[in-house]
Image: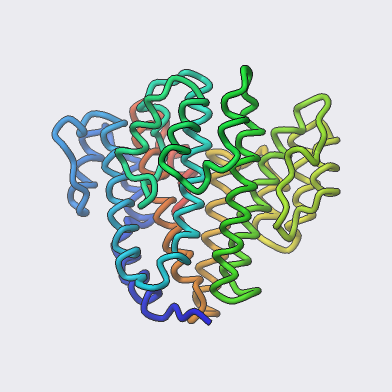
């Protein structure tokens, strides 16, 4: 059985350096990007001079800070590094999916990098190289050449003449599910880390169902990921056949009944900042509670990892919102960080 006491203690210590809701609330009222830059520098962020007036530059500073903190956790993990890799693998899955979407849309490299979190397997330079690729195929080929574990089976679906982005994400998700569940089981069969991975799978199935609910004809089994607990194939298929994302959300909410995620999916059309931000906020709240009730479990570590992701996303939310002139009330309402 894996012990987490020392890693949890260090995660709690690092958590005291997170910006927190009051700081983000104050930043949401900043007049411009230089004001946000000054606040970030005051709290330990290292900014290049050119970043002070650039949303992309401020985002880069956030990515670097998160990457540095992940590296710190990795050094402290010692022999448990393969288990910590479960968290990094989830970030890589999210990054690769975003890069694939950006490549398919021919988006500028800095747009593709927005919101990504560097990890040991995909550090900043690797993400930048992937963001420069002209199409989904070269992204997959490059990942395969680097022997990234999530590249398995990705090349055939990404190099087709008309790549299906959802099928690419399903392929990524299936590989992640297999590897992450295997890694989590090493920490103790049926433990909290296993449950965390299963929830990642359930949430990804829910997101896919919301997208597919807008399609006319689709075979549910082609896009459903096995390995979760709350969104079985029949529920997934029922959500899709509503042909309406709002009604699909209510069907999915029954799978998450009794949880904060159930409330989020029951009201997908009311999620400030989008359903993914609302899901992350609810997930963090559950883990913070679990960290209090089960302090010797990996809950404190998992909560810290997701709060790190939230910090990077909230910085992105604010810098782009302020650069576009969004009202401070809207920016505050859409924050993920809640404490």
Which image quadrant is residue 274 in?
Answer: top right
Q: Residue at x 53, y 22 (%)?
A: 104
Foreground residue among 89 and 34: 89
Q: Which residue is drawn at 83% across and 26% down?
A: 217
Which image quadrant is residue 162 in?
Answer: top right
Question: How is colour applied across the structure in the image?
Answer: rainbow
Image coordinates of residue 262 in percent, x first then y, are 71, 55
Foreground residue among 67 and 163: 163
Which image quadrant is residue 47 in?
Answer: top left
Foreground residue among 317 and 123: 123
Q: In this view, does 78 lie to the left or right of 50?
A: right
Q: How many labels does the image show?
A: 0
Q: Residue at x 76, y 38 (%)?
A: 222
Quadrant for the C terminus, please: bottom left
Residue 229 visible at all: yes
Q: Which residue is drawn at 71% across and 37% down?
A: 210
Image coordinates of residue 206 in percent, x first then y, are 70, 45
Residue 295 visible at all: no
Q: Which residue sits furthest left?
A: 49
Q: In this view, does 296 lie above or below 335?
A: below
Q: Is residue 150 above or below residue 104?
A: below
Image coordinates of residue 3 in percent, x first then y, are 46, 81
Q: In this view, does 77 lie to the left or right of 96?
A: left
Foreground residue among 176 and 201: 176
Image coordinates of residue 125 in percent, x first then y, are 30, 38
Q: Is residue 12 left or right of residue 199?
A: left
């Amino acid at each position: 059985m894996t012990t987490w006491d020392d890693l949890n203690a260090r995660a709690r210590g690092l958590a005291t350096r997170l910006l927190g809701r009051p700081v983000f609330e104050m930043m949401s009222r900043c007049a411009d990007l230089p004001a946000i830059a000054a606040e970030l520098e005051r709290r330990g962020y290292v900014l290049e001079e050119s970043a002070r007036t650039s949303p992309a530059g401020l985002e880069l500073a956030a990515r670097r800070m998160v990457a540095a903190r992940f590296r710190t956790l990795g050094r402290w993990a010692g022999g448990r590094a393969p288990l910590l890799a479960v968290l990094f693998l989830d970030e890589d899955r999210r990054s690769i999916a975003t890069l694939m979407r950006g490549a398919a849309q021919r988006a500028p490299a800095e747009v593709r990098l927005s919101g990504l979190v560097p990890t040991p397997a995909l550090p900043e330079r690797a993400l930048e190289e992937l963001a420069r690729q002209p199409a989904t195929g070269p992204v997959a080929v490059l990942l395969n050449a680097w022997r990234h574990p999530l590249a398995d089976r990705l090349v055939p679906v990404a190099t087709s003449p008309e790549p299906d982005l959802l099928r690419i994400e399903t392929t990524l998700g299936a590989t992640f599910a297999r590897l992450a569940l295997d890694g989590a089981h090493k920490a103790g069969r049926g433990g909290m880390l296993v449950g965390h991975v299963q929830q990642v799978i359930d949430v990804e199935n829910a997101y896919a169902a919301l997208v597919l609910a807008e399609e006319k004809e689709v075979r549910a089994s082609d896009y459903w990921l096995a390995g979760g607990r709350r969104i079985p194939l029949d529920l997934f298929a029922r959500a899709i056949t509503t042909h309406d994302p709002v009604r699909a959300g209510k069907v999915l909410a029954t799978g998450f009944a009794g949880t904060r995620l159930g409330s989020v999916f029951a009201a997908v059309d009311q999620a400030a900042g989008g359903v993914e931000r609302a899901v992350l906020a609810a997930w963090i709240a559950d883990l913070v509670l679990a960290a209090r009730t089960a302090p010797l479990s990996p809950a404190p570590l998992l909560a810290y990892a997701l709060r790190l992701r939230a910090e990077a996303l909230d910085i992105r939310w604010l810098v782009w919102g302020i650069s576009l002139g969004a009202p401070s009330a809207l920016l505050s309402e859409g924050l993920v960080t809640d404490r």
